Image (spheres, rainbow, N blue to C red):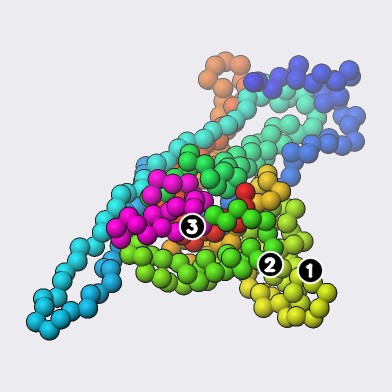
Amino acid sequence: MTMDINWDITTNRDTLKSLLRKEFVTTDREPLVEHKMLYNVLSTEDEYERDLRYAGLGMASELTDGEEIPVQDAPIDTTKEYRQGRWGNGFRITAGMKKFNKIGLMKMLTKDLKKTMIETKDIDLMTRWNNLTSTSYVGFDTLALASNSHTCLDDSTTMYDNYLDAALGVTSYESAKVYFRTLVDDQGMTFVAKPDTLAVNPYYEREAKELIGSSQVPWKADNEINVYKGDSNVEVFSRITSSTWWCLLAKNNALYDVNVFTSQQPNLIVKDAPDNTEDTVVLSSQWYTSGHGDPRMIFCGDL
């Protein structure tokens, strides 16, 4: 669409006169960016990135005297590719509208274009987190990020379950803590990770902060000490659409594997229109991709 002088449909064509006290534009604000708290934010110069999943050695075997020591192969799995995608937006403004508008339309739309590009990326990346059980987003094991039957590489018999399907509360939070205390690696051996982020939707903000921040046990009348005080950071995500969604994350663990690769941040190109109109075209594009490989460091409490 081209912004020309007929864009103004007010009775008195107010944008073309110096009579307005204020233009009320709700889109003229700082962009809302939440994905950086849920993704590993990585830069790339390549059209695609490729990760490989494999495991080290399994358990040792007890031997009888004189028996040969067995040797093992390190199990290898599949690769995960992250291929760049391009996104773009822009506007065109006529020579007449540039000349006669009195509301700084060119400046406002250029600023708005920058915000739109940033928020487009954020909304797109948060879609994964609003659809944690969707097989549109799969990792190495071809399962959704949240699943009851994630597989390991040992012999395809060891599984782990990172989806609870229960409301946030003391008991469910304890279940999440136990999950990170009893993790299994790709050889089925137990290891421990420390969760650091309790991610919640806006409706759970009070419950989450009481659960993690209160001195006594939440929602009880006695004076029992809250052993989980200060245990994790509470992060509230406004782009989450479900009123029951919550996750516990080991975001700072080296094995946290939800990623966004960006080869180009939003640019800004201002140029003359490719004709003799003297219009101006303002364009912006960006390149990025996202995905997850191993979901072990994410525990989904509820959707």
Helix, strand or loop under label 3? loop
Of mark 3 and mark 1, the one earlier in the sequence is 3
The answer to whether the residue labelled 2 contacts the one labelled 1, judged by CB atoms less than 8 Å apart, is: yes
Whether residue 213 is situated above or below residue 247 in the rendered picture: below
Label at residue 170: 2
Label at residue 219: 1
- Which residue is label 3 attached to? 161
Magenta region's main secondary structure? loop
Helix, strand or loop under label 2? helix
Q: Position of residue 131 (x, y in %)?
A: 57, 43
Of mark 2 and mark 3, the one earlier in the sequence is 3
Whether residue 64 is situated above or below residue 55 in the rendered picture: below
Splitting the image into 4 quarters, where does residue 112 fall?
A: top right
Q: CA distance from mark 2 to mark 3?
A: 19 Å
User: Is residue 88 covered in magenta?
Assistant: no
Task: State left or right for residue 221 relative to residue 231.
Answer: right
Q: Over which residues does the magenta segment extend?
A: 141-162
Q: Amino acid at mark 1?
A: Trp
Q: Residue at x 72, y 23 (%)?
A: 97
Q: Residue at x 69, y 22 (%)?
A: 3
In the foreground, 201 or 33: 201
Q: Amino acid at mark 3?
A: Asp
In the foreground, 79 or 27: 79
Whether residue 167 is situated above or below residue 101 in the rendered picture: below
Label at residue 287: none
